[in-house]
Every structure is written in structure tokens, then in C-alpha cells.
Image (cartoon, helix red, strand yellow):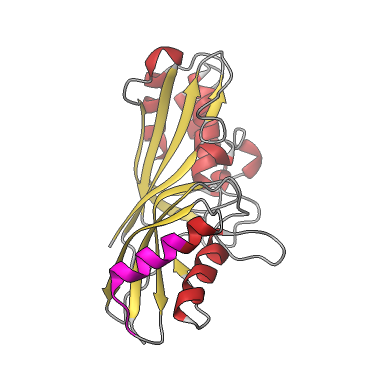
Amino acid sequence: MPRYKLTIEYDGTPYRGWQRQDGFPSVQQALEEAIAEFTRHPVTLFAAGRTDTGVHALGQVAHVDLETEWRPEKIAEASNGLLKLNSHTVAVLACEKVADDFDARFSAKRRHYCYRIVNRPANLTVEAGRAWHVKKPLDVGAMDRAAKVLVGHHDFTTFRSTDCQAKNPQRTLDTLDVRLAADHGAGGRAIEITTSSRAFLHNQVRSMAGSLKLVGEGRWTANDLRSALEAKDRKACGPVAPACGLYFMQVDY
């Protein structure tokens, strides 16, 4: 059975995350149903990462096995046509045939996420549902300096969900940077928290973002963040940032 790699973009707002769930819309279901409609057989997609409810993606990757060979361009074209027809906010950006041993999840060398904060007093309009709205001014420099505490190999128990199914809470965080985004116009400023690792724990990025927001507000220092990490206790974590600001950006293979 030929195997294909799909690069996928989606607005996660209408979906209960990536993974197919009975009774709830999911990105996986939307795309599997679109592909099954033109291939005329059931398919199962395997993703590089299972994003949560409301999380977006600009570069999610999945693989799928088909019963017959198709031109990759045709798979993308047919999928996008059916996704649009059914009013899904999902798009296949690219499709390519890959070796049988390629696995979207297990072949991944690095995953990249971005968390967006719009920092202004006024309510969000265009970016409502696509960023975390924080009214109080944030010290981006302090956030970036504190973020370096979390870079490296650590036990991230404090920064993972109590529902996390990973057997080991230890992860190696390759990068964690906080910076102002490009010009955001007169309506405030956008702050981006970017991070990369081979693998992340459930809710890890949102947990780190919520704690860094406390640093930006002046309620925590870098030492407070270090103490939270060293506590290895979920109760020591700051508030978990909302899903709407999180973007799965890219996967390296």
C-alpha cells in the first residue's frame, strides 16, 4: 500500500482537537472522511502530534496508506475540494509519496510550536479565538530571560497535565524564546513564545506560556519559575494559557 505524507493547516476552533472522538468533530475525522470519499475506501491518518481542542496548526504532518497509487497533487486537490465543500477549516498544504517506513510521529526529529499573546487593553476582533488576550502590559524581556530557565533536559512534571499519558515526565527543551512579533499596527502588540523539542508533554507549552505570563506581569521572577520547575508538582504551575493562542508550526524529519 503506497504511503503519503500530508502537511496540514487548520483553524482548531470548531474541533475537539486532532484525534477522532465519537460524537465530537475532530480534524482527523474531517480529513479521513474527505480522503475516503474520493478513494472509495476507509483510511486512517497518523499525525505527528495530537493537538487539543481549539489549538491551531500551520504545519501539522500526518501519513496515510492508500489501497492504490494516486498522484500526490490529486490527493491534495481532492481533499481540499471536499473539505471546503463541507465547510471545514482544514487544508492540505502539500502531499508527497514517502517510503513505507516513514511515520509522521515516530520519524519526527523536532517539533515546533508558537504561542501568541495580543497585549492591549481593547478587546480582540480579527484575532479573537486566535490569540490570548492579555490587557496588562507584559515585560517581554523579563519573560525571555526567565524562559531560559526551562531550556535543556528537565523533569517537566510541573508543566504537564494531570491527564498526560507519557510514561516519563523528562523532556529536552531545545529552545524557548519570547519576542515581539512583527509590526502589529496601532492596535497593540503581539508577543510570540516559540519553542522546539523532539517531543512535548500534554499541555506543556500552554503551561509554560501561562507561567511566563506571570513573569511578564511582574508577579513571578525567573527564580520563581525555576522553583516551580524544581518542585516537580503540578500545583506549582501558573495558570494554563488558553488553547486559542497555540499553533503547531512545523515538524522536522
Residue 176, placed above or below residue 98: above
Per the rendered image, the range of residues in magenta is: 69-81
Residue 112, placed above or below residue 222: below
Q: Is residue 51 left or right of residue 112?
A: right
Image coords of residue 176 (percent x, y): 37, 38
Q: Is residue 167 visible?
A: no
Figure quadrant of the N terminus: bottom left
Q: How many marks?
A: 0
Q: Is residue 41 left or right of residue 16?
A: left
Figure quadrant of the C terminus: bottom left
Magenta-colored segment: predominant secondary structure: helix
Image coords of residue 147 (percent x, y): 40, 32
Q: Is residue 75 magenta?
A: yes
Q: Is residue 178 left or right of residue 235?
A: left
Residue 94, placed above or below residue 208: below
Image coords of residue 225 (percent x, y): 50, 31
Give me the residue at 45% from left, 26% from top. 222
| Of residues 240 and 36, the one drawn nearer to the viewer in this rendering | 36
**Quadrant hosting residue 240:** top right
Q: Is residue 40 visible?
A: yes
Give me the residue at 48% from left, 63% from top. 82
Give me the residue at 44% from left, 49% from top. 57
Image coords of residue 228 (percent x, y): 55, 36
Give me the residue at 37% from left, 20% from top. 141
**Quadrant hosting residue 96:** bottom left
Q: Is residue 26 magenta?
A: no
| Of residues 22 and 143, the one drawn nearer to the viewer in this rendering | 22
